[in-house]
Image (tube, helix red, strand yellow):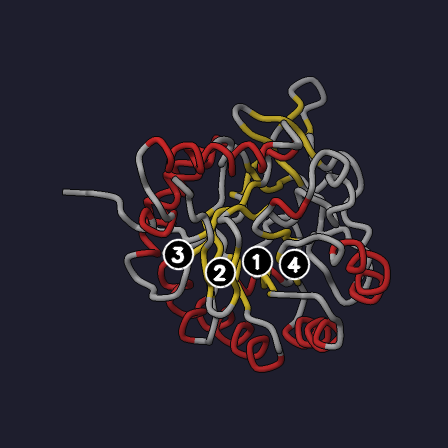
Amino acid sequence: MKIDLSVNIGKINFKNPLLVASGTFGYGEEYSKFFDLGKLGGVITKSITLNPKIGHPPVRTCETASGMLNCIGLENVGVDRFIKEKLPFLKQFNTKIIVNIAGSSVEEYIEVVEKLNRAQGIDMLEVNISCPNVRQGGMIFGCDRKLAYNCVEKVKEASRFPIMVKLSPNVRDITEIALAVEDAGADAISLINTLVGMAIDLEKRKPILSNVTGGLSGPAIKPVALAMVYKVAQKVKIPIVGLGGITNYKDALEFILAGASLIQIGTANFVDPQSAIKIVKGMEGYCQENRIKRINNLIGKLETT
């Protein structure tokens, strides 16, 4: 039986539900030697800002129980170099290109969008209003309903691409933020970004990360992510992209049952560079075994009674 893994978000058709998460896949070149990027539903780039950023000094990552902490600090080449040096490589592959964007002000987001509007080959933007390891911008917008609405509304007005808004779990009620960005015109929502976490070197009596705190990702956050995807799915009408601790096809299908149309693979890319491809194959195998012709038939089909 032929399995249809394709999923639509608006007018964009993804060949399968598998995306690779921003910040865990570089600009695509780093992983292209391990598999054909064309087998992915889409590639989400590192967060791109108006100007290049060097990020935080070392130490920027550390392993934790069932996960990892990072405080990269949105290191990237900046939008101009991205368009000139990084985008042409991604355009070689038969996959959707989603550019994650970030800024410390609404005006910076708009300038990045305006530059990307003139580029060819981009399918969608992911608006990062939720990064927990920078001291300004991003997460401030993501923690306040009115600020989130204003930022997303302005980005939507400026963008010629559909926009997906990445939400933070570090809020009182994530459904309030989700409803706000939906009202502002978001075409989809991705959640969750990392949880704020910390690690301490007992011998030195100092934080391990240079930024003191960072973003916790990996299997440890999966239960939190699943619950938030489920809660948001009960409130919004736009598609949800689920992420947070997905390491295998069973994890991925749980997010789809909870209400996600697409899923993103993040930390698992560091453990096994071919994780994403294995998960696609696993989902297809599950559908074959259970005689499910279309992956769409599983979206939001969690039975709670």
Mark 4 vs mark 3: give the one in front.
4
Q: Mark 1: which amino acid?
A: Met
- Whole-angstrom CA distance, mark 2 to mark 4, is 27 Å
- Whole-angstrom CA distance, mark 4 to mark 1, is 24 Å
Q: Which residue is mark 4?
A: 97
Mark 3 vs mark 2: give the one in front.
3
SS label for mark 1: helix
Q: State the mark number for residue 143.
A: 2
Badge 4 density bin: few <14, some 14–19, many ≥20, Cα 10 Å: many
Residue located farthest toward the front when viewing the structure as drawn: 1
Residue drawn 52% across the image and 65% down it? 12
Q: Are marks 4 and 3 in contact (CB under 8 Å)?
A: no
Residue 146 seen anywhere in this rendered image of the structure: yes
In this view, 103 is above or below 251 = below
Mark 4 vs 3, N-terminal side: 4
Q: Which residue is mark 1?
A: 139
SS label for mark 3: helix
In this view, 135 is above or below 24 = below
Residue 207 seen anywhere in this rendered image of the structure: no
Q: Does residue 139 appear left or right of residue 257 in this picture?
A: right
Q: State the mark number for residue 174.
A: 3
Badge 1 density bin: few <14, some 14–19, many ≥20, Cα 10 Å: many
Q: Nearer the viewer, residue 255 or 180?
A: 255
Q: Mark 3: which amino acid?
A: Ile
- Whole-angstrom CA distance, mark 1 to mark 2, is 6 Å
